Image (cartoon, helix red, strand yellow):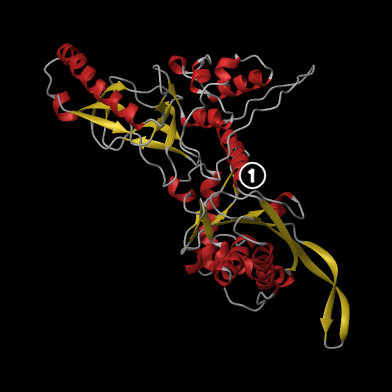
Amino acid sequence: MSEFQLVMPKMGESIAEATIIRWTKNEGDMIAIDETVLEIATDKVDSEVPSPKAGKLIKLLFKEGDVVPVNAPIAIIALDGTAASAPAAPKVEAAAPVEVKAAVQQVEQTIVAAQNTVSSNSGNRFYSPLVLNIARAENISMAELETIAGTGAEGRVTKRDILAHVQNRGAGSIPAAAVNAAPVSVQPEKPSSPAPVAKPAVSMNGGDEVIEMDRMRKLIADHMVMSKHTSPHVTSFVEADVTNMVLWRDKAKKVYEKREGEKITFTPMFIECVVKAIKDFPMINITVDGYNIIKRKAINIGMAAALPSGNLIVPVIKNADNMNLVGLTKSVNGLANKARANKLAPDDIQGGTFTLTNVGGFGNVMGTPIINQPQVAIMATGAIKKKPAVLETEMGDVIAIRHMMFLSLSYDHRVVDGSLGGSFLRRVGHYMEQWDVNREI
């Protein structure tokens, strides 16, 4: 019987694993070509996995909730031609176990090789790189590591186990012989990957309610903590007079909506100004890899968008520097609509080189956003407010009512100095202030 191994697909350049949310097919079900077999989730987006082959699902290799490396086999499918030619179901079932057993053994070997784990120097226990990194940072020897009771699968030591051990160790409950043994030897981490620290104890009071984070909120929390550990954040602010932008949009929005069938917001206008400033200061459009700086050729602008759950996601406008204002508007509206409908594809949120977030949408005048790694800068636009401002005219200075907005730029001070960050932000404000109120759309 010919068989096909369905593998965990690679969902993006930075995605190493995915979580199985739900199997839509059970063992014994027939599957058509391109029919969905399971739903998965990565740290970027949820997605469905179709089968490239038709046949019968004879073995599921993982359960719902399991985290699986990309390219690892996750199911075995008996191909349609050989499965259909079997004279009777009992014979198929009788023949299947022997062949499936051999296939599963092969799959298990592949999974072991694909999993991101390493073995200890002695014994039969396995430790993940995260556990070994914590052990190295805390000077925990291999002998001491062997004494930790694991609560993970097959008794493996989890992050929670070793952090709890570190707390108890600090209280002096670990034998001196284990502490004084040789420390764990692992590969050194990059400077941008600090070891995790133990969480502070939280006390509960009467009437308190415990609400578990949903999966996406957990991912966001981890990503934000990682960003603050990776990049020393500095934030600069400028106040921009966006009166011309407000007047132009008031004049153009009805014309644009009638012609294009959709609304034009401030977001594509802001993005156009950001793209112009990036061209003037290309060292904002970079990524850090250890002690190397990668200068990005493409200008891909991420824009924070709200999901129905209330969480935020950052879809990306690819090659924004090649688009005019109409193209930017259509891209912004299309991605925002897909985000609201939970229809974003993995490619929609990959490859960003700079991020824009609008805190003004919540009525805030300014914010200090956290960098969206591996980028080095993120800009926030505040609420547009009418204010009295001093204008310089040929007849002298006058006070007038103007539409003012604060811009804030958080940047990675490892590679972006205050001069570059401040100059870039001021240039964005300049392009906003110089918006042509008579331009055609």
Whole-percent x, y for residue 23 in the image: 39, 26
Q: Which residue is mark 1?
A: 228
Asked if residue 108 is positioned above or below residue 295 in the image, the reply reads above
**Residue occupying the point 73% across, 23% down:** 202
Closer to us: 56 or 353: 353
Classify residue 201 by image quadrant: top right
Whole-percent x, y for residue 209 in the image: 72, 21
Residue 344 makes an appearance in the image = yes
**Residue occupying the point 52% across, 70% down:** 324
Q: Quadrant of the N terminus?
A: top left
Query: For the residue marked with disc 1, what is the amino acid?
Result: Lys
SS class, disc 1: helix
Q: Alpha-carbon neighbours of circle 1 within 10 Å: few (<14), some, or many (≥20)? A: some
Asked if residue 249 is positioned above or below residue 290 in the image, the reply reads below
Q: Is residue 294 left or right of residue 387?
A: left
Q: Quadrant of the C terminus?
A: bottom right
Whole-percent x, y for residue 192 in the image: 56, 45
Asked if residue 323 is positioned above or below residue 207 in the image, the reply reads below
Asked if residue 168 is positioned above or below residue 67 in the image, the reply reads above
